[in-house]
Image (cartoon, coloured by chain):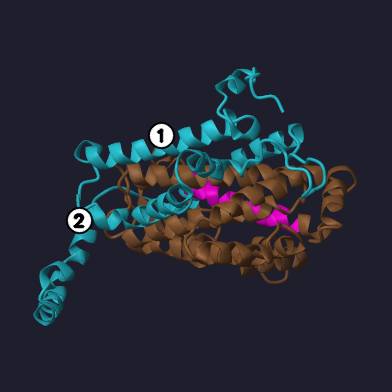
Chain colours: A brown, B cyan
Amino acid sequence: MSATPGQANPVRAFVEQVWGSIFRHGLPSTDKVAARTALTNFFLHIHPVRVKRSAIRVSYTLCLGGLSFFLFILLTITGLFLMFYYIPSVDQAYQNIKDLQFVAVFGDIIRNMHRWAAHGMVITVWLHMARVFYQGAYKPPREFNWVIGTLLLLTTLLLSFSGYLLPWDQLAIWAITVGTNMAKYAPIVGPYTRYLLLGGNQVAQGALIRFYVLHVIALPLIGFLLMVVHFWRVRKDGFTGGL
Amino acid sequence: MATVERPAGAARGARASTGPELATPPLVVRRREEEETVVTFPTLVWREFLAGLGMFVFLMAVSIQVNAPLLQKANTAITPNPAKAPWYFVGLQELLERFPPIMAGVAFPTFVIVFMMLTPYLDKNPSRRPQDRKVAITMFTIYLCLAVAFVLIGALMRGQAFNFDPGLLFGHPHLSSPT
C-alpha cells in the first residue's frame, strides 16, 4: 500500500490516496475489519456493529421493515422525477400525466413504478405491523416504538391517499370525494376538517394544491422524521430476536 | 466491572423507591450477550441489498407490463358508478354501508387507532411465546381477518351504487340493478 519512494507510479498513488480517503477500511475480510468499516461509515452506521444472529434471520424479520424503507426511498426518487413534469393545476395536471405516459422518455415506467411501489408500501407496512405483533416485539421496552410505528402506518396511508388525487382523473377526484366525505361524519369538527383539507366544499383547485403540498413536502418530512426515530429506537431498545 | 457497578446501582436504588429494577438493566444485557452475534456489515447489509434488489426487479417487471390506471379527466358533473375510495379505505366505506356514519366513519376508526397505540401498554403479559399469548393472538387475528374481509368485499363485491354483488367476483354482475 505505502508508496516506495522513487519507484511508485504517481497515478496509482494518487488513486490509492483518493480511495483511501473515502473508504477508511478495506473489504470486510475479517469480523474486525467489518466492524471497523461499519463504525466509520455514515451509511452503515444505521445498523449496530453486531447483532444477535437470530434477530436478523430472514425467516424471522421477513425483511418487511427494510422493504418498507426501501420502497419509501424508491418512491422518493421516482416522485422526484415525476415532479419535473407535474404542475398541480386543474388545467394542466391531467395533461402532464398523459405526457408522462406517452411523451416523456421512460415517463410511463417511472409513473407506473411510483404507483405500484405506493400500493406495495401500504402492504409491506401492514405486514410489518402484523409480524411485529405476532412476535410480541412491541413488549417493553419497545412500547413507544410500536406507537411510532402506528403513526408511520397512518402517515403511509395519508401519503398514498394524498397522492391519489394528483393525476386529476375521474378515479382520483371521486376516490378523494368519497374518502373526504367520511371525514364529514366526525361530530362538530368533521365538516371543518373536510373544508380545511379540501380548501373548499368541493374537490377543486384548492384541494389539488393542498394535497400536492402535503404529498411532496409535509407528509414525507413527517414520515422521514418518524422513521429516523423509529430506527434509532430499534437500535437503542435492542433487537428482539428468536422466540 | 461488577464491583464498579454495584455501588452506583446501590446509590441509585437509595434515591428511587423502585430502585432494584432500574439498577439491573446492564445485567440483562450481559446475559443476552451469551447468544451468538454476527457483524451487520456485510451479513445484514447483504441480505437487505438482495431483498431490495428483488423488490426492485419485481416492481420493474410489473411497471413494464401493467400501466397505472388513468381514466378520463376529472369531471365533477359525471359521477362514476360505483364511486369507491382507494382500496385501503374501501373497508371503511364498506363499514359505512352497514353502520350509522358516526359509528363507521368516526367511532370505529378512532377506536382501532387508539386501541392499536395502547396495545403495548394494555398487554401486561411479559411472554413473547405464541403459546402464552393465545388471547392477544386470537384478537389480533380476528381484527386482521375482518379488515382484509371488508377491504375485499368493498373492492371486489360491490357493484353499481355500491350494492353488494358477489357475482362480480366471477365476472357475472347481478342483472337486477341496471342503470
Quarter of the figure with residue B129: top left
Q: Position of residue B57 (x, y in %)?
A: 66, 38
**Is residue A2 at all visible to an observer of this figure?**
no
Q: Residue at x 47, y 56 (%)?
A: A34
Disc 1 residue crowd, few under 14, some 14–19, many 20+, Cα 10 Å:
few
Say above or below: A109 vs A194: above
Q: Which residue is mark 2?
A: B31
Instruction: Look at the numbered disc 2 and give the secondary structure of its residue.
Output: helix
Q: Which residue is mark 1?
A: B145
**Looking at this view, is A230 or B57 the one in front?**
A230
Both on one chain, marks 1 and 2? yes
**Looking at this view, is B142 or A185 the one in front?**
A185
Q: How many marks?
A: 2
The CA span between labels 1 and 2 is 38 Å
Q: Position of residue B107 (x, y in %)?
A: 41, 53
- Please identify the quadrant where the C terminus of chain B is shown: top right
Quarter of the figure with residue A13: bottom right
Q: Is residue B119 left or right of residue B160?
A: left
Residue at the right extreme, as displayed = A103
Is-magenta flag for residue A66?
Answer: yes
- The amino acid beneath tag 2 is Arg
Along the polypeptide, which appears first: circle 1 or circle 2?
2
Q: Residue at x 35, y 62 (%)?
A: A144
Identify the subunit bearing mark 1. B
Say above or below: B161 vs B24: above
Query: Closer to the observer: label 1 or label 2?
Result: 1
**Looking at this view, is B101 or B126 the one in front?**
B101
Q: Is residue A156 left or right of residue A18?
A: left
* Highlighted magenta segment, given as a residue range: A63-81
Quarter of the figure with residue A76: bottom right
